[in-house]
Amino acid sequence: MRQLCMPQGLSNDELSKLETLICSARSVHRGEALYRSGDRFDNIYAVRSGSMKTVMAHRDGREQVTGLRLAGEALGLDGISEDRHACSALALEDSTVCIVPYTALKSLCREIGSMQERLHKLLGEQIVREAAQMMVLGSLSADERVAAFLLDVSERNAQRGYSSAEFNLRMTREDMGSYLGMTLETVSRTLSRFQKRGLIDTQGKHIRIVDLDGLRQV
């Protein structure tokens, strides 16, 4: 995951400093929280293995899934603005994360320009992802939402050198519904309809995209 987590063009000395900074890792068991909403913000994390979901709670107690983080992706940026985490991060499966202390990272960014640029890119990517999710929730039909979600996971897997056509989606159908603004029943019916049309094949959490072009045309 180095090419995703680390900026390009670092000297050996700079790379050594960065690797020293993120040498610590933590295991997070399935269902366990890496951090919870309101926790003090101290670290940024990179998913090393497994997958995580981010969740925000409404004041009446309802929870909304706000994101899916796969191996190689960053977590915890939501805490930068208020020094408190705005959402909770929960493991969808047994996972490990690299821990990057934010105070030390800021010092390193002042020392290494490309590191600062990489942090800015991570923040920009988060803004773009959240804007795209607003469009999904605000203007797409149920079929288009599910297709866009599957294509997004497919593309992100491909970026990491994994199969874009077959993957284990650790999110439950209920989590998918929460993330896509749909009921559990609608998600299940949509996936069944896609399977009947020959677009995908699902076996539990395992999803195989059979007709990528057809899914893009939904």
Image (cartoon, helix red, strand yellow):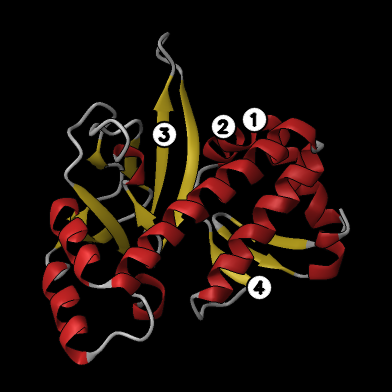
* Disc 1: CA contacts within 10 A as few (<14), some (14-19) or many (>=20): some
Viewer-nearest residue: 180 or 12: 12
Question: How far apart in space, not on screen, are marks 2 and 3 (Cα)?
Answer: 10 Å
From the image, tell me which residue sits under label 2.
Answer: 178
Q: Position of residue 194 (x, y in %)?
A: 80, 53
Callout in the foreground (2, 3): 3
Residue shown at 81% from the left, 60% from the top: 215
Question: How far apart in space, not on screen, are marks 1 and 2 (Cα)?
Answer: 5 Å
Residue 48: image quadrant is bottom left
* Disc 2: CA contacts within 10 A as few (<14), some (14-19) or many (>=20): some
Residue shown at 24% from the left, 64% from the top: 109
Question: How far apart in space, not on screen, are marks 3 and 1 (Cα)?
Answer: 13 Å
Disc 1 to disc 2: CB gap under 8 Å: yes
Q: Amino acid at mark 1?
A: Gly
Question: How far apart in space, not on screen, are marks 4 and 3 (Cα)?
Answer: 27 Å
Q: Amino acid at mark 4?
A: Ala
SS category of the residue bearing label 1: loop
Viewer-nearest residue: 16 or 216: 16
Q: Position of residue 26 (x, y in %)?
A: 16, 58
* Disc 4: CA contacts within 10 A as few (<14), some (14-19) or many (>=20): some
Disc sitting over residue 181 in the figure: 1
SS category of the residue bearing label 3: strand
Q: Using the rendered image of the protein, determine whether residue 211 is visible from the camera's viewpoint.
A: no
Disc sitting over residue 191 in the figure: none
Disc 4 to disc 3: CB gap under 8 Å: no
Q: Amino acid at mark 2?
A: Ser
Q: Amino acid at mark 3?
A: Val
Residue shown at 56% from the left, 66% from the top: 156
Comes first in the chain, label 4 or label 2: 4
Task: State whether residue 202 is above or below residue 4.
Answer: above
SS category of the residue bearing label 4: loop
